[in-house]
Image (cartoon, rainbow, N blue to C red):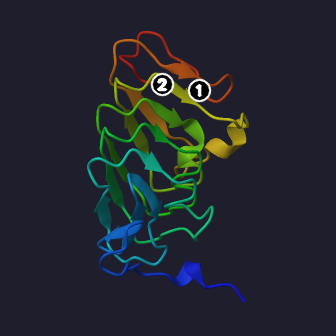
Amino acid sequence: ESFPVKALKAIYVENGNRTFYTDDGVLYQGKKLLVYPACKEDSSYAILNGTEEIADGAISGDVYGSNSFLTSISIPGSVEKIPNSMFFCCENLSQIDFAEGIKEVDSGAFWLCPALKHVEIPASVTKFTTEYTSADNWLSGDEGSLDIYFRGSSAPEFDDGVCDTRHGSGGKV
């Protein structure tokens, strides 16, 4: 029988472990966020500065069960890419703060996040694409829409069919 990871509230690592460490119950390995526990009851979390990578499914229901407590998250500019399905089924997530420096956002990162109504993408992002192309997976808010704002003066690379750039809208996608 497998370990019931969907019931995790926190993860702790023994002092002196040279491979893993935790921040307030969140598991890291080197400069990589591995697991944000599915049943962690905090409403907000700031990913550690210096984190460069986030494991697929680290926060979402993809691997460890979606977190229904998390309402806001801050991601430092040291993170290079926001992976696909990062926030998948995080039903109460309503705010994501992306710092400048992030280079790539998988447009599938926000799938099925009904409380998330808008996202601001930093000017540093040059690619906003996904390996999946079904617009049906864009369902987010009550009406199935998610407003995406780009803070830069030129738009990043976008997916065909998932995002349409609206010229003259001040960066709104």
Q: CA distance from mark 1 to mark 2?
A: 7 Å
x, y (%) of residue 24? 29, 73
Local packing at callout 1 (Cα closer than 10 Å; few below 14, some 14-19, many 20+) is: some
Marks 1 & 2, CB-CB < 8 Å contact: yes
Per the rendering, the mark at residue 143 is none
Residue closer to the observer: 44 or 166: 44
Q: Is residue 134 left or right of residue 15?
A: right
x, y (%) of residue 21? 35, 69
x, y (%) of residue 137? 67, 45
Local packing at callout 2 (Cα closer than 10 Å; few below 14, some 14-19, many 20+) is: some
Q: Quadrant of residue 84?
A: top right
Residue at (31%, 62%) from the top-left corner? 45
Residue at (30%, 63%) from the top-left corner? 44
| Above or below, comparing residue 22 to residue 125 in the picture | below
- Location of the N terminus by quadrant is bottom right
Residue at (49%, 35%) from the top-left corner? 105
Q: Quadrant of residue 121?
A: top left
Per the rendering, the mark at residue 173 is 2
SS for tag 2?
Answer: loop
| Above or below, comparing residue 169 to residue 38 in the picture | above
Residue closer to the observer: 93 or 28: 28
Q: What's the residue type where badge 1 is placed?
A: Cys
Badge count = 2
Q: What's the residue type where badge 2 is placed?
A: Val
Q: Is residue 172 left or right of residue 72?
A: right
Q: Is residue 156 left or right of residue 18?
A: right
Residue at (53%, 17%) from the top-left corner? 165
Residue closer to the observer: 92 or 76: 76
Earlier-in-chain disc, 1 versus 2? 1
Q: Quadrant of residue 69?
A: bottom left
x, y (%) of residue 106? 55, 37
Residue with the mark numbered 1: 163
